[in-house]
Amino acid sequence: MTQEQLQFLRAIPIEDLASRLGLDVRHHKALCPFHNDHHASLSFNVRKNTYRCFVCDAHGDTIDLVRHLLNKDFQQACLYLSDGSIEPIPAHSTHSPHSPHETRHTFDASRYAHFFDRPYLSPEARRFLFDQRRLDPRVIRWCRLTSWRDRQGIHWLQIPYYDPDGNLIGLQNRNLTPGAEPRFRFPKGAHCSIYNLPILNLLKENEPLYIAEGASDCWALLSAGHKAIAIPSATLLKKDDLQPLLTINSKLLTQFHMYPDRDLPGERLFLQLKELLPNLQHHQLPPDCKDYSDLYLQSHLNGY
Ligand SMILES: [Zn+2]
């Protein structure tokens, strides 16, 4: 890349770029994505075309912003910026005073993807995952779980959904306050049909794959050393969503396994999946376990 090309990339309007990368830019300021910010500490210098955070001192130009926000090296960041195929900035993502209440109906992954580049687990999240659920930290890292606190001070666990190629397709927020409502929250348009699809790439021939009913049972299965995915809502599931499973079934002779929850929806999901995956095997949970997480916790406490 020549000096001239670099100058061109550094001259891309930084506030437009920041908006395109998902930051909410208002009055030359935004919430800093590089620390847990609540006060729009990131400022843009429009004249120099740079940014700086007054709290964590993150700073730089357009190339630095892409490097740090999207976890790319210098070369990749330059390619990203010079790639003509990047979607132009949609009109509603820049804030004009005439359209303050634009709503989005499709999931804008670029707005959220950077949350999971450097996952952060709050003490509340760590207590939930490691003290209460006894999950394996390697599993939590693989799943890129992160946490945040909203304006009401409620702690949330943020659970990303990826397609088999690792592209963010949706996310789910789980309330960490015991007994609180709502327990889950999804951004508009999030596509949360099958959880943990990237594991399919690690699956070997003949290796069993477990199907859980929710992300937390999926973490328990993974922590127990199984390869697992989850189907959190059979009602949201479209036939096309199951295509990756049908593909590995025929390519790798994958044997599917399931511990259905001890309730009607659990057994219904099993029967529904059994029609599409005839070799799906049913495992019975013991009477004192309502789901696989219970069983995992029980065997963990018994020292297995
Ligand atoms: Zn900062």
Image (cartoon, helix red, strand yellow):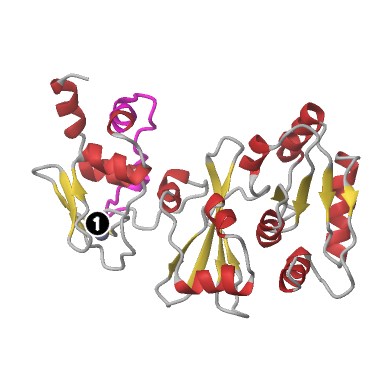
Q: Residue at x 24, y 41 (%)?
A: 64
Secondary structure category for the residue under label 1 = loop
Q: Is mark 1 within 8 Å of ligand 1?
A: no
Residue 257 visible in the shown view: yes
User: Going by the picture, which residue comes out furthest to the left?
Assistant: 47
60 sits left or right of 304 in the view: left
Residue 189 visible in the shown view: no
Residue 135 image point, x, y percent? 62, 64
Of 99 and 53, the residue lying toward us: 53
Q: Quadrant of ligand 1?
A: bottom left
The amino acid beneath tag 1 is: Arg
Residue 148 image point, x, y percent? 44, 66
221 sits left or right of 137 in the view: right
Q: Residue at x 43, y 61 (%)?
A: 120
Of 54 and 11, the residue lying toward us: 54
> In which quadrant is the C terminus drawn?
bottom right
The question of residue 91 being in magenta is answered with yes
The question of residue 280 being in magenta is answered with no
> In which quadrant is the N terminus drawn?
top left
Please say if 73 is above or below 184: above
User: Going by the picture, which residue comes out furthest to the bottom?
Assistant: 179
Few, some or many C-alpha atoms within 10 Å of disc 1 (few <14, some 14-19, many ≥20)?
some
Please say if 201 is above or below 181: above
Q: Residue at x 59, y 54 (%)?
A: 139
Of 289 and 275, the residue lying toward us: 289
**Among the 4 quarters of the image, the one containing residue 86:** top left
Instruction: Name the residue tied to disc 1.
Output: 26
Residue span colored magenta: 77-98
Residue 250 image point, x, y percent? 81, 28
User: Going by the picture, which residue comes out furthest to the front?
Assistant: 303
Residue 185 image point, x, y percent? 57, 64
